[in-house]
C-alpha cells in the first residue's frame, strides 16, 4: 500500500509555549508526526504537501530539513547537470517510445518474407521511423499482397513492429464433412472439442466402440431434421495394459526397471495424436522368472477417440 510518509517529510522547529502550539495545531487541523518537546523548542515532522499550511499557521516555525524521495529530487534539481541529465533521459524515452527501430517478419517461406520486406520499403516504412498507424500499415500490406498472403497480422512490441503471416501456398483450407463422430474405442468422455455438430453424449459418460458421439442431424424450428456439418474431436479416458519383457542381465535392478518402464510408455503412446497423453500409470507387476524380467503396467490414457487411427 502507498505510504505518503515514504515520499518525504519536512522537519520543523518552532519556539513557542506548548499550550499555544497544541491549540494552533488543533485549530488548523494539522497532521504532524514525531512531535518532541525540548527545553526551548518544539520539533516535529509534516508532509511536504502541508508546507504552505504550516507556514501560514505557525509563522515562527523554521524548516530544518526535508527527508525521503522528494528531498532527493529537490536536491538533485538544485544541481544543473542532474537536471540536464533528467531532461535528456525524458527526451530519449519519449523519442524511443515514439520510434519504430525494427520490423520483425515471422512466417513460412523466405520468399514471402522478402516480399513483405520489399513491400514495406515501397510503402515508405524504412526503419527507424516515427510511430505510424499500425492498422493502416496492415491494411495497405493486405491489399498489396492479397494474391500472395492468405493471412497477415501486425502488432507492436515496444519499439518494434511484429508481422506474422501465412502464404497462400501454405494455407490449408479445411473442408467440413457431414459424417457423425463415432467412438473408435471404449472410454469415459473427458472433453468435447466440437465447433460443428450436435452432441449425443455427456462428459463423464461411459461409451462403447461404435456409438455415435456427435450427430450430423439437427432439428429445425419446425421439428424437422436437417443435415449439418460436423467438425471437432471428442477426448475420453481409456485403459490399456502393457506387458513388456527383457532377458535377465547383470544391470542393477533400478536400470532394468527404468528400461522396461520406458518401453512400456513407448508402446502405450504408439498411436498418439496431438492432444493425447498418458494420464495415469500403475505398475501391476515387476518380476524375474526363468531368466526373463517382466513388467505389466496399467495405463489410463487421455485420447481422441473419434479420429480413426
Image (spheres, rainbow, N blue to C red):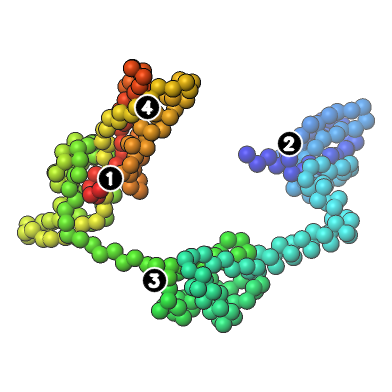
Secondary structure beneath dot 4 equals strand
3D distance between C-alphas at marks 2 and 1: 76 Å
Secondary structure beneath dot 2 equals helix
3D distance between C-alphas at marks 3 and 2: 80 Å
Q: Nearer the viewer, mark 3 or mark 4?
A: 4
Residue under label 2, please give it: 26
3D distance between C-alphas at marks 1 and 4: 31 Å
Q: Nearer the viewer, residue 111 or 198?
A: 111
Q: Nearer the viewer, residue 266 or 178?
A: 266
User: Of callouts 3 and 4, which one flags the residue occurring earlier in the amino acid sequence?
Assistant: 3
Please identify the residue farthest to the right as the structure is shown: 40
Residue under label 3, please give it: 169
Look at the image and tell me whether residue 303 can be seen.
Answer: yes
Residue 34 image point, x, y percent: 79, 31
Residue under label 1, please give it: 304
Q: Nearer the viewer, mark 1 or mark 3?
A: 3
Amino acid at each position: 500500500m502507498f505510504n505518503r510518509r515514504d515520499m518525504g517529510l519536512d522537519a520543523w522547529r518552532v519556539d513557542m509555549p506548548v499550550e499555544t502550539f497544541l491549540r494552533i495545531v488543533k485549530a488548523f487541523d494539522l497532521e504532524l508526526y514525531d512531535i518532541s518537546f525540548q527545553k526551548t523548542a518544539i520539533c516535529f515532522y509534516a508532509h511536504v504537501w502541508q508546507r504552505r499550511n504550516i507556514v501560514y499557521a505557525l509563522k515562527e516555525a523554521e524548516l530544518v530539513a526535508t527527508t525521503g524521495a522528494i528531498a532527493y529530487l529537490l536536491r538533485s534539481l538544485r544541481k544543473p547537470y542532474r537536471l540536464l541529465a533528467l531532461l535528456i533521459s525524458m527526451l530519449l524515452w519519449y523519442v524511443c517510445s515514439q520510434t519504430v527501430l525494427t520490423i520483425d517478419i515471422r512466417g513460412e517461406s523466405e520468399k514471402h518474407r522478402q516480399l513483405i520486406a520489399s513491400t514495406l520499403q515501397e510503402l515508405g516504412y524504412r526503419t527507424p521511423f516515427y510511430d505510424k498507424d499500425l492498422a493502416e500499415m496492415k491494411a495497405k500490406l493486405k491489399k498489396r499482397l492479397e494474391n500472395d498472403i492468405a493471412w497477415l497480422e501486425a502488432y507492436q512490441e515496444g519499439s518494434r513492429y511484429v508481422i506474422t503471416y501465412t502464404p497462400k501456398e501454405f494455407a490449408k483450407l479445411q473442408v467440413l464433412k457431414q459424417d457423425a463422430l463415432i467412438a473408435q474405442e471404449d472410454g469415459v468422455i473427458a472433453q468435447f472439442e466440437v465447433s460443428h455438430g450436435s452432441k449425443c453424449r455427456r462428459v463423464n459418460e461411459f461409451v462403447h466402440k461404435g456409438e455415435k458421439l456427435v450427430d450430423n442431424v439437427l432439428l429445425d424450428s419446425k421439428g424437422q431434421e436437417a443435415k449439418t456439418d460436423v467438425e471437432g474431436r471428442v477426448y475420453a479416458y481409456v485403459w490399456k495394459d502393457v506387458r513388456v519383457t527383457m532377458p535377465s542381465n547383470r544391470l542393477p535392478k533400478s536400470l532394468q526397471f527404468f528400461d522396461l518402464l520406458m518401453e512400456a510408455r513407448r508402446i502405450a503412446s504408439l498411436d498418439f495424436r496431438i492432444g493425447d497423453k498418458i494420464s495415469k500409470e500403475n505398475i501391476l507387476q515387476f518380476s524375474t522368472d526363468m531368466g526373463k524380467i517382466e513388467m505389466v503396467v496399467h495405463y489410463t490414457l487421455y485420447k481422441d477417440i473419434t479420429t480413426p487411427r
